[in-house]
Amino acid sequence: MESHARVATDKAARYMTQLAKHWSHKFEVAYDETSAVFPLPLGTCRMVAHPDGLDITVEAADLEGLARLEDVVAKHLDRFAFREGELKYGWTRAWAAGSVDPRAMRINALH
Protein backbone atom coordinates (compact mmCIF):
# COMPACT_ATOMS: atom_id res chain seq x y z
CA MET A 1 0.00 0.00 0.00
CA GLU A 2 1.18 3.48 -0.81
CA SER A 3 0.30 7.03 0.12
CA HIS A 4 1.45 10.36 -1.29
CA ALA A 5 1.41 13.95 -0.07
CA ARG A 6 2.63 17.21 -1.56
CA VAL A 7 3.54 19.67 1.20
CA ALA A 8 3.73 23.33 0.19
CA THR A 9 6.82 24.96 1.70
CA ASP A 10 9.79 26.91 0.42
CA LYS A 11 12.01 25.02 2.90
CA ALA A 12 11.45 21.51 1.52
CA ALA A 13 15.14 20.62 1.09
CA ARG A 14 15.96 21.94 4.54
CA TYR A 15 13.25 19.92 6.31
CA MET A 16 14.02 16.78 4.30
CA THR A 17 17.73 17.04 5.14
CA GLN A 18 17.03 17.65 8.83
CA LEU A 19 14.83 14.56 8.92
CA ALA A 20 17.46 12.53 7.07
CA LYS A 21 20.15 13.53 9.55
CA HIS A 22 17.81 12.87 12.48
CA TRP A 23 16.85 9.38 11.29
CA SER A 24 20.35 8.46 10.08
CA HIS A 25 21.31 7.83 13.72
CA LYS A 26 18.95 4.82 13.80
CA PHE A 27 18.31 3.81 10.17
CA GLU A 28 20.18 3.35 6.88
CA VAL A 29 19.07 6.62 5.30
CA ALA A 30 20.11 7.66 1.78
CA TYR A 31 19.80 11.31 0.79
CA ASP A 32 21.23 14.09 -1.32
CA GLU A 33 20.24 17.73 -1.93
CA THR A 34 16.89 16.91 -3.57
CA SER A 35 15.82 13.41 -2.51
CA ALA A 36 15.83 10.99 0.39
CA VAL A 37 14.89 7.38 1.11
CA PHE A 38 14.09 6.27 4.66
CA PRO A 39 13.72 2.51 5.24
CA LEU A 40 11.82 2.44 8.53
CA PRO A 41 10.40 -0.44 10.59
CA LEU A 42 6.84 0.52 9.55
CA GLY A 43 7.71 0.80 5.84
CA THR A 44 9.58 3.03 3.42
CA CYS A 45 9.42 6.79 3.03
CA ARG A 46 10.69 8.61 -0.06
CA MET A 47 10.96 12.39 -0.43
CA VAL A 48 11.73 14.73 -3.29
CA ALA A 49 12.35 18.39 -2.51
CA HIS A 50 11.26 21.12 -4.92
CA PRO A 51 11.61 24.90 -4.55
CA ASP A 52 7.89 25.18 -3.70
CA GLY A 53 7.18 21.94 -1.88
CA LEU A 54 8.07 18.48 -0.69
CA ASP A 55 6.74 15.32 -2.35
CA ILE A 56 6.40 12.49 0.17
CA THR A 57 5.58 8.87 -0.63
CA VAL A 58 5.20 6.25 2.08
CA GLU A 59 4.75 2.51 1.62
CA ALA A 60 3.61 -0.04 4.18
CA ALA A 61 2.37 -3.62 4.22
CA ASP A 62 -1.13 -2.80 5.47
CA LEU A 63 -3.56 0.04 6.04
CA GLU A 64 -2.77 0.34 9.75
CA GLY A 65 0.96 0.56 9.08
CA LEU A 66 0.37 3.10 6.32
CA ALA A 67 -1.67 5.34 8.63
CA ARG A 68 0.95 5.10 11.37
CA LEU A 69 3.76 5.89 8.92
CA GLU A 70 1.89 8.94 7.57
CA ASP A 71 1.50 10.15 11.14
CA VAL A 72 5.15 9.54 12.12
CA VAL A 73 6.48 11.36 9.05
CA ALA A 74 4.10 14.30 9.50
CA LYS A 75 4.87 14.71 13.20
CA HIS A 76 8.61 14.67 12.61
CA LEU A 77 8.43 17.20 9.77
CA ASP A 78 6.14 19.45 11.80
CA ARG A 79 8.79 19.58 14.53
CA PHE A 80 11.30 20.98 12.05
CA ALA A 81 8.73 23.37 10.58
CA PHE A 82 7.52 24.75 13.91
CA ARG A 83 8.08 28.33 12.76
CA GLU A 84 5.68 27.75 9.84
CA GLY A 85 3.10 26.03 12.02
CA GLU A 86 1.69 22.64 11.10
CA LEU A 87 2.21 21.76 7.48
CA LYS A 88 -0.73 20.58 5.33
CA TYR A 89 -0.36 17.01 4.06
CA GLY A 90 -3.59 15.83 2.42
CA TRP A 91 -2.46 12.22 2.02
CA THR A 92 -3.75 10.39 -1.07
CA ARG A 93 -3.68 6.62 -0.84
CA ALA A 94 -3.15 4.18 -3.70
CA TRP A 95 -3.53 0.42 -3.80
CA ALA A 96 -2.28 -2.07 -6.33
CA ALA A 97 -4.98 -3.13 -8.79
CA GLY A 98 -7.20 -5.83 -7.30
CA SER A 99 -6.20 -5.13 -3.71
CA VAL A 100 -8.72 -2.44 -2.81
CA ASP A 101 -10.71 -3.22 0.31
CA PRO A 102 -14.02 -1.31 -0.02
CA ARG A 103 -14.93 -1.99 3.62
CA ALA A 104 -11.69 -0.41 4.86
CA MET A 105 -12.28 2.55 2.54
CA ARG A 106 -15.76 3.12 3.98
CA ILE A 107 -14.49 2.89 7.55
CA ASN A 108 -11.66 5.30 6.71
CA ALA A 109 -14.11 7.77 5.13
CA LEU A 110 -16.13 7.89 8.34
CA HIS A 111 -13.13 9.04 10.43
Image: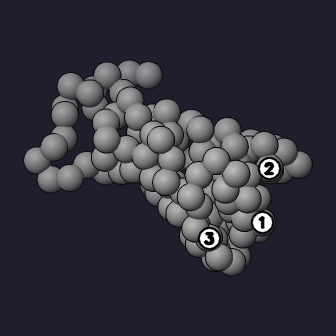
Residue closer to the observer: 110 or 95 = 95
Residue 102, percent from left and from top: 19, 32
Q: Amino acid at mark 2?
A: Phe
Do residues under tags 2 and 1 come within 8 Å of each other at their CB atoms?
yes
Q: Say if 28 sits above or below 77 in the image.
A: below
Q: Which mark is residue 14?
A: 1
- Residue drawn at x 52%, y 41% is 70
- Residue drawn at x 64%, y 47% is 26
Q: Say if 50 sits above or below 72 in the image.
A: below
State whether residue 28 appears in this view: yes
Helix, strand or loop under label 3 = strand
Quarter holding the C terminus is: top left
- Residue 73: quarter of image: top right
Nearer the N terminus, badge 1 or badge 3?
A: 1
Helix, strand or loop under label 1 = helix
Q: Which mark is residue 80?
A: 2
Residue 32, percent from left and from top: 65, 76
The residue furthest right is 83
Q: Which mark is residue 31?
A: 3
- Residue 66: quarter of image: top left
Q: Amino acid at mark 1?
A: Arg
Q: Say if 6 sits above or below 43 in the image.
A: below
Nearer to us of marks 1 and 3 is 3
Nearer the N terminus, badge 3 or badge 2?
A: 3
Nearer the N terminus, badge 2 or badge 1?
A: 1
- Residue drawn at x 78%, y 43% is 79
